[in-house]
Amino acid sequence: MIERLCIIGVGLIGGSLARALREAGFCKQVVGNGRNPAHLQQAVELGVIDRFDTDPARAVAGADMVLVAVPLGAMESVFSSIRGHLAENAVLTDAGSAKVSVIEAVQRAFGKVPGFFVPGHPIAGTEQAGVSASFADLYRDRRVILTPAETTETEAIARVHAMWEAAGAQVTEMTAVHHDAVLAATSHLPHVLAYTLVDSLARLSDRDEVFEYAAGGFRDFTRIASSDPVMWRDICLANGAAIELMIDRFSKDLQVLKGAVRAHDGDKLLEIFTSAKQARDRFIEK
Amino acid sequence: MIERLCIIGVGLIGGSLARALREAGFCKQVVGNGRNPAHLQQAVELGVIDRFDTDPARAVAGADMVLVAVPLGAMESVFSSIRGHLAENAVLTDAGSAKVSVIEAVQRAFGKVPGFFVPGHPIAGTEQAGVSASFADLYRDRRVILTPAETTETEAIARVHAMWEAAGAQVTEMTAVHHDAVLAATSHLPHVLAYTLVDSLARLSDRDEVFEYAAGGFRDFTRIASSDPVMWRDICLANGAAIELMIDRFSKDLQVLKGAVRAHDGDKLLEIFTSAKQARDRFIEK
């Protein structure tokens, strides 16, 4: 049970958690913080938060749980601005899509990784952004990965764990390094590919016609290219090494496929496509 | 109005056309042909076709419209087997996803490109295959591209045009070469990327865990990797040159993006992602 939850960055992710915890009766009061008072006022009107303060230091005062849900590039300045202003019993967590870089940002801001900080990543979202897109069921049956540092206190982990479970999520733990490798493969690489494809096609001379003849498959394939560019710039900067590795791996495999196309090697093409279809169908069955 | 429609290859594409034309009252009788009598019997039971004949030469007898909807690799043998058996007033068309190769197959089978042959491509489909997945609305408001050769008769084009319009589609015309370039960009390349990504991940040592943490974005991005591997092998073989060109273009753009990741060039990343998001959002608005 949370007495006062402070959400720094009241968008899709932060707003949906607030909605879920209110619905579950897991949270008495929600205070919002962000840079844009109009957005925060909207969040109040939507019933997502009770009140807001545009000063992060004042916003976190008296909160026993603080979630930082801002783009990765804004994490360090948020941590710096709340340092020394957290309540004594406060637990601090985040929702960043890359974890090593957040832990490093905390370390720089606090001079160490405090025991009350629990790095976290809810694997949920849509290509929509902003509090108006938030909804209480966003985390229902979704995964949340916690990546505690060596210094993280067991009780702090337990409290963040309980919070996400109350929002309907399945919570697991792994190291930050492992998290970043797994997410580079399943999320960061696909986004990079979708953005690159759409940008590539948008720069074709006959681009209007090209898009005109795109069908449903293209729509689904490129949905993630409608995601927030700032968020994804920050993810690419924060998890660059793991993403580079996956781009290299993918590029190598794409060259193999291209070689099969060039060599008219139907057996090889069928092998690749069949293996992919089987893996994808297995994934969907789960 | 079609007196007798013969569909060679009664799957998602052929079956859905038959259903649509029956619903529209545009077709009196439908005869099916294929290699598997059990599938054809199922098509009869589903009410998609009236009867079937597993011999293509007998199946096309007396039909005033013949649609060949088989994988690209099977086109030539179908054309060869129906040569000399078509009714005098018959129009022949196809539903292949690449057009130059189909015209070449017709030329080899008939010794020339007959005036009654109208190359066509309905840009519709799902990742499901087979007559059981067919439905009458598949072509509703979808594009059908006809790519007549110089020898194609105007009246034959008009009859195929009318057929697809009766099925609810919007029909346009372009050259076969242009069609193959446009489709390589909007359809063939995305499929190649989705197959390659899933195959790439499926060969990671921690693949089970990787798929476990994949979310909704991954599901949509890879949906087309559940498509029929034989169909896509044939498309890659049939439209290889255009696909290679698009793979090269994409690979170059992916290397530019990787360079920006490596150089921590946030401005460049933001520029690419913003351009892609804008193009994709414009595409969706249409």
Image (tube, coloured by chain):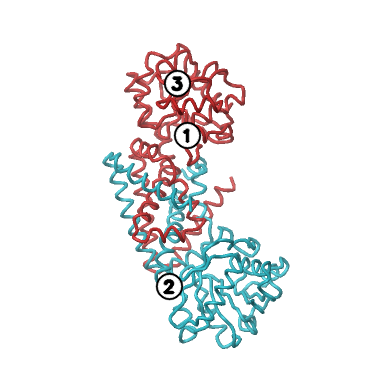
Chain colours: A red, B cyan
What percent of the width, then of the height, locates residue A165?
57, 28
Q: Chain of mark 2?
A: B
**Badge 1 is on which residue?**
A130
Placement of the C terminus of chain A among the 4 image quadrants: top right
User: What separation in Å lies between label 2 and label 3 (alpha carbons)?
Assistant: 60 Å
Placement of the N terminus of chain A among the 4 image quadrants: top right
Residue B71 in the image: above or below residue B272: below
Q: Tell me the crowding category of disc 3: few under 14, some 14 to 19, or many 20 or more residues within 10 angstroms, Cα based.
A: many
Mark 1: amino acid: Gly
SS for callout 1: loop
Q: Name which quarter of the figure residue A230 lies in.
A: top left
Residue ID at (57%, 77%): B159
Q: Chain of mark 1?
A: A
User: What separation in Å lies between label 3 and label 1 (alpha carbons)?
Assistant: 22 Å
User: What separation in Å lies between label 1 and label 2 (alpha carbons)?
Assistant: 45 Å
Q: How many marks?
A: 3
**Badge 3 is on which residue?**
A92
What percent of the width, then of the height, locates residue A101?
36, 31
Mark 2: amino acid: Ala
Q: Chain of mark 3?
A: A
The mark found on residue B176 in the picture is: 2
